[in-house]
Amino acid sequence: MRNAKICEEIVFPVEFYDVDSMRVVYHGNYVNYMEKGRCALLNKIGFGYHEMEKAGYMFPVVDIKVKYLHSLTFGDKVKVVAGLTEYENCIRIAYEIYNADTNELCTKAESTQMAVEIATKETKFVCPQKFVSLVNQLL
């Protein structure tokens, strides 16, 4: 994945509850797939949602972009590749979602999350040093 500093990949099946009556994955569920990839990536870094909270921060999504290329259907296997592209001022993650059976790229996406201090509800324009340090350890 281009420009990604750290990547993580997960594979899982398309479940029946993810699809519409035509057995095609509902477009909104790709955001759920992104969340699965994001969680795997943040856990790899050592700064998953529990660690964020313990450090006194939450990271709401402030921007999301999704480009749909091909559909996934019931029974397909999904491969999500999540790559960290920015980590000092915000968390920006690029996603590539594939049909794992055919290796066809189905969706390209990006999410941006900003640090918010839990105690004050103040938005921070730099990421907590703990997160930056964990990323730098993996680089």
Image (cartoon, helix red, strand yellow):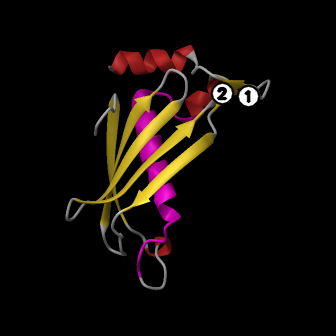
Q: Position of residue 11 (x, y in %)?
A: 32, 54
Which image quarter: residue 49? top right
Give neighbour class at mark 1: few <14, some 14-19, many 20+ (Cα, 10 Å). some
Number of numbered discs present? 2
Determine the secondary structure under disc 2.
strand
Q: Position of residue 84 (x, y in %)?
A: 40, 33
Q: Position of residue 123 (x, y in %)?
A: 71, 27
Quarter the N terminus occupies: top left
Nearer the observer, 94 or 138: 94
* Magenta stretch: dominant secondary structure: helix
- The reply to whether the C-beta atoms of the residues labelled 1 and 2 are less than 8 Å apart is yes
Residue type indicated by callout 2: Tyr
Quarter the C terminus occupies: top left
48 relative to 136, above or below: below
- Residue 32 among those drawn in magenta: yes
46 relative to 2, above or below: above
- Return the residue at label 1: 118
| Span colored in magenta | 23-49
**Residue 57 bears which disc, if any?**
2
Which image quarter: residue 136? top left
